[in-house]
Amino acid sequence: METSRYSVSLPEDASEDEAAAIAAVVSAHLRDREAAAAAAAAEASGEASWNGERWEFAGRVAALQSREVRVPDGAPTDAWSAAGRTERF
């Protein structure tokens, strides 16, 4: 990720709500960029990750256990280990 600072300018006539909305969008965008950079670094280093597989695993749990789950980022990437922890998701 870039190490430079970002400059954001708000319209002078922006209300507090509009300014808060703009700040939230910019913050979310920067957070997404950081997450993408971290995922790319993890993939490049060969670390195991859930990229694209978390949703597949959640779908499998939904089909087999008839309930919706959100697989956390910190869940084991080994399918057998993760399957043993589905009650925690």
Image (tube, helix red, strand yellow):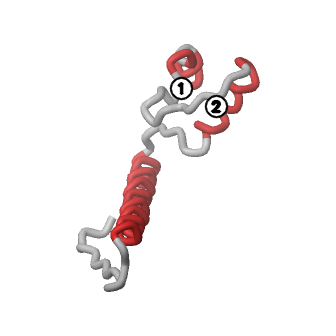
Which residue is situated farthest in the bottom direction here?
12
- Residue 27, quarter of picture: bottom left
Residue behind mark 1: 78
Residue behind mark 2: 58
Q: In the picture provided, is 53 more to the left or to the right than 32?
A: right
| SS at badge 2 | helix
**Measured Cα–Cα span from mark 2 to mark 1:** 14 Å
Q: Give the vertical position of 48 relative to 5 (above or below).
A: above
Which residue is situated farthest in the right direction here?
63
Please name the amino acid that badge 2 sits on.
Ala
- Residue 55, quarter of picture: top right
- Foreground mark, 2 or 1? 2
Q: In the picture provided, is 37 more to the left or to the right than 49?
A: left
Query: x%, y% of residue 85?
Result: 52, 17
Q: Earlier in the sequence, mark 2 or mark 1?
A: 2
At horizontal 24% and vertical 73% (from top left) the residue drawn is 4
Q: In the picture provided, is 5 more to the left or to the right than 40?
A: left
